[in-house]
């Protein structure tokens, strides 16, 4: 490999591409689409957060304005919690539109996350949304295909490759030089666009650049740079093994369809086939069935709680529940809460493991499809990934459990067992409770979850350069 | 110089080149005549290292093409039938690029001189190749070969499609290069141009070099008769 010659070839490649009018026309179209994508993404997130703040204030107001009442009525009154969109969600919508951002919390019931965009859309969402990530993952590769399909095949067809090969550069030098040139054009045109979109989106929605946002943005920039390099290597490689520029273009467009449409859809189907997950109704029914087998926590005399009754009487050294210094009914309810929460967690963890297995199929397939890899990494770094969603569900369940437990403690200590239902406690009891605040997944966790996809991207880089080396060693690809 | 020893290329059952023995010394121009499929381009491609011989050896300045495919590039230049180069670059930019890849760093004036020595008109130097005629592009190809200062020049149908004036200009430049000590191997269909410019002429048929004559020993008419009898 001769770096000096590679530099000359790359420089010439850049000059040639940038002098072609079609390159600029395509670029301007993509810039236009990107501006629309970033603006709509930002305005959607802004509008969403605004509506969410209003809804949250309304929910809090209703919660706080409850009159004096029985604690268990408060527990059943319920509370709606929300997940704010991540600062980079305008860049990559990821799963946000499909998984919802709010949960209604109440005693004894573990509700799943709801109110997703998909649930309120007319079905067009199925075709995907226009985001900056989508432009970079799907449309920019198409741009690289259109500016690069003839990069070697065209030279072969015109006989220029033979003249080039008669200079001092080896075929490998030429292929690497072409790849570097193509990559630099893609970087030159699109990395500043990514940077600008991030700066605009973050500046306009969050207003401050925290170290977490900075790190995520930097990693987004780096991984997309790697992805564009992979695409450039691929385009150069296909162009080098094609007899003519036309053949190269057809092959590359077919690969684009395969990578961006066929494999992702197949990955989803394959994942579902290999690891079947229950639907929402089946999941909730299974939990309800399991809980019903554990008795009725609203009935202190339910035989399922006989052991609790015996141990409580023993603990306080009394003969009957009416002699207890605490409200036995509240104890049963808390026990029921412990049981139902445990059952929910078990079922939920099983469900999440099934989903993770399905996602692993997609991550593994990124070894044959770089688009799947970058899609996964981008979602993770933007905080719109599956882990963020499950973390929200887990945190809300923990919050629901703690909140219910506190209310049960009020019930336990401030409400007497006799004439339980006729008593009330001060509203201060629940007004002093801490509000829910979602703690997003750390960037380290996101990176850990992207390891397979990051590895796949690295594999594509190494395998791509290896493939160019192999192609360059074959004389049939020179003529 | 250029040398082939029992050079053979076989594709399956088809013998594209059979036991070619050939030598082109410094200052000589060897024209290979023959019909399509006679083995002329195969011979050129074997010397360029684009094809691996089935048997035999090809040498450029005494260096084995098969053993040192990269090394021989320092010693040769090649001009194909149609020189397309980069249409979006000017003649001067094309020459600068190919020269740089050959390891030469010419300044603007030197590049102009090289283009002029190949017969390109001054006003065309900084025009994009997209607007060039075939003859003009061929001249840029010659300039690339001259710039490389190679001692061996391989030409594949270089005058095909050129008008008589451009073809004549081309012959003059080739002759000049030959006089300066370059060994030239040229595949062509043009019997009269071969007679005019070459020092030696070989006639090929079905992969075999059937006849070799000195250009000075034969008239144009005799060469034509020989060619027609041979092919």
Image (cartoon, helix red, strand yellow):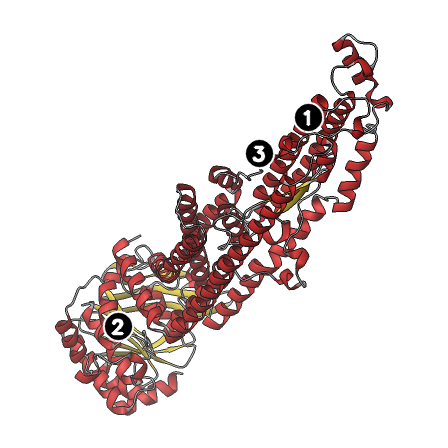
Q: Residue at x 32, y 74 (%)?
A: B86
Which of the two discs, 1 and 3, labels the residue nearer the N terminus?
1
Is residue A465 shown left or right of residue A431?
left
Parent chain of label 2: B
Q: Position of residue B138 (x, y in %)?
A: 27, 80
Q: Nearer the viewer, residue B128 or B174?
A: B128
Q: Is residue A434 above or below residue A457?
A: above
Dot 3: what SS? loop
**Residue A98 position within the rendered picture, expressed as x and y whole percent measured from the top left:** 63, 52
Q: Residues within 10 Å of mark 3 (few under 14, many from 20)?
A: few
Examine the rendered structure and indicate whether residue A392 appears above or below residue A174. Answer: above
Give the chain letter at badge 1. A
Q: Quadrant of residue A289?
A: top right
**What residue is disc 2 on?**
B94
Residue for badge 3: A434
Report the side of A449 relative to B149 (left or right). right
Residue sitting nearer the eye, A141 or A294:
A294
Label 1: which residue? A410
Q: Residue at x 59, y 46 (%)?
A: A56
Q: Nearer the viewer, mark 1 or mark 3?
A: 1
């Amino acid at each position: 490999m001769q770096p000096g010659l590679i530099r000359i070839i790359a420089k010439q490649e850049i000059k040639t591409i940038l002098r072609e009018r079609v390159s600029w026309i395509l670029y301007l179209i993509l810039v236009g689409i990107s501006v629309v994508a970033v603006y709509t993404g930002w305005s959607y997130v802004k509008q969403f957060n605004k509506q969410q703040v209003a809804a949250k204030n309304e929910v809090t107001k209703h919660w706080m304005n409850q009159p004096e009442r029985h604690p268990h009525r408060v527990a059943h009154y319920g509370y709606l919690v929300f997940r704010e969109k991540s600062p980079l969600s305008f860049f990559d919508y990821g799963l946000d539109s499909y998984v919802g951002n709010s949960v209604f919390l109440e005693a004894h019931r573990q509700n799943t996350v709801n109110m997703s965009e998909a649930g309120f859309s007319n079905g067009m969402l199925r075709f995907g949304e226009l985001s900056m990530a989508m432009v970079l993952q799907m449309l920019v590769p198409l741009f690289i295909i259109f500016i690069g399909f003839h990069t070697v095949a065209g030279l072969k067809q015109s006989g220029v490759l033979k003249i080039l090969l008669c200079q001092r550069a080896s075929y490998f030098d030429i292929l690497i030089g072409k790849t570097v040139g193509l990559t630099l054009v893609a970087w030159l045109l699109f990395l500043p666009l990514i940077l600008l979109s991030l700066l605009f989106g973050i500046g306009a929605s969050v207003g401050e650049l925290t170290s977490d946002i900075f790190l995520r943005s930097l990693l987004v920039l780096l991984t997309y740079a790697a992805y564009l390099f992979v695409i450039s290597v691929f385009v150069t490689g296909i162009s080098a093994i094609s007899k003519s520029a036309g053949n190269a273009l057809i092959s590359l467009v077919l690969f684009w369809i395969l990578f961006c449409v066929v494999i992702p859809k197949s990955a989803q189907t394959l994942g579902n086939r290999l690891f079947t997950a229950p639907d929402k109704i089946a999941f909730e029914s299974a939990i309800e069935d399991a809980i019903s087998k554990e008795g009725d926590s609203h009935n202190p005399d339910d035989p399922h709680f006989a052991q609790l009754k015996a141990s409580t009487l023993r603990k306080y050294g009394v003969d009957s529940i009416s002699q207890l210094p605490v409200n036995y009914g509240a104890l049963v309810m808390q026990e029921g809460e412990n049981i139902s929460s445990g059952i929910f967690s078990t079922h939920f963890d099983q469900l999440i493991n099934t989903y993770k297995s399905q996602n692993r199929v997609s991550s593994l397939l990124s070894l044959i499809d770089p688009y799947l890899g970058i899609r996964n990494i981008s979602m993770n770094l933007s905080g719109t990934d599956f882990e963020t969603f499950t973390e929200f569900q887990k945190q809300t369940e923990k919050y629901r459990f703690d909140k219910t437990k506190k209310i049960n403690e009020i019930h336990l200590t401030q409400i007497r067992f006799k004439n339980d239902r006729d008593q009330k406690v001060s509203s201060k009891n629940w007004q002093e409770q801490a509000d829910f605040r979602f703690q997003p997944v750390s960037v380290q966790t996101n990176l850990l979850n992207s390891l397979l996809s990051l590895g796949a991207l690295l594999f594509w880089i190494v395998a791509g350069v290896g493939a160019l080396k192999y192609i360059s060693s074959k004389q049939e690809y020179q003529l | 110089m250029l040398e082939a020893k029992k050079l053979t290329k076989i594709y399956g059952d088809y013998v594209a080149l059979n036991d070619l023995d050939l030598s082109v010394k410094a200052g000589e121009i060897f024209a290979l005549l023959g019909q399509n499929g006679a083995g002329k381009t195969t011979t050129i491609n074997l010397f360029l290292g684009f094809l691996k011989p089935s048997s035999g050896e090809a040498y450029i300045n005494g260096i084995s093409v098969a053993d040192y495919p990269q090394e021989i590039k320092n010693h040769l230049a090649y001009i194909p039938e149609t020189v397309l180069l980069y249409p979006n670059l000017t003649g001067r930019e094309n020459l600068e690029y190919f020269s740089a890849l050959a390891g030469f760093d010419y300044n603007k004036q030197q590049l102009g001189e090289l283009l002029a020595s190949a017969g390109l008109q001054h006003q065309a130097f900084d025009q994009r190749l997209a607007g060039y005629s075939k003859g003009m592009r061929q001249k840029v190809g010659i300039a690339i070969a001259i710039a490389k200062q190679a001692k061996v020049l391989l030409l594949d149908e270089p005058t095909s499609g050129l008008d008589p004036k451009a073809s004549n200009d081309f012959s003059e430049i080739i002759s000049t290069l030959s006089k300066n000590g370059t060994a030239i191997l040229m595949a062509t269909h043009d019997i009269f141009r071969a007679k005019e410019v070459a020092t030696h002429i070989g006639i090929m048929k079905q992969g075999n070099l059937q006849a070799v004559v000195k250009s000075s020993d034969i008239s144009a008419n005799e060469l034509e008769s020989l060619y027609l009898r041979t092919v």
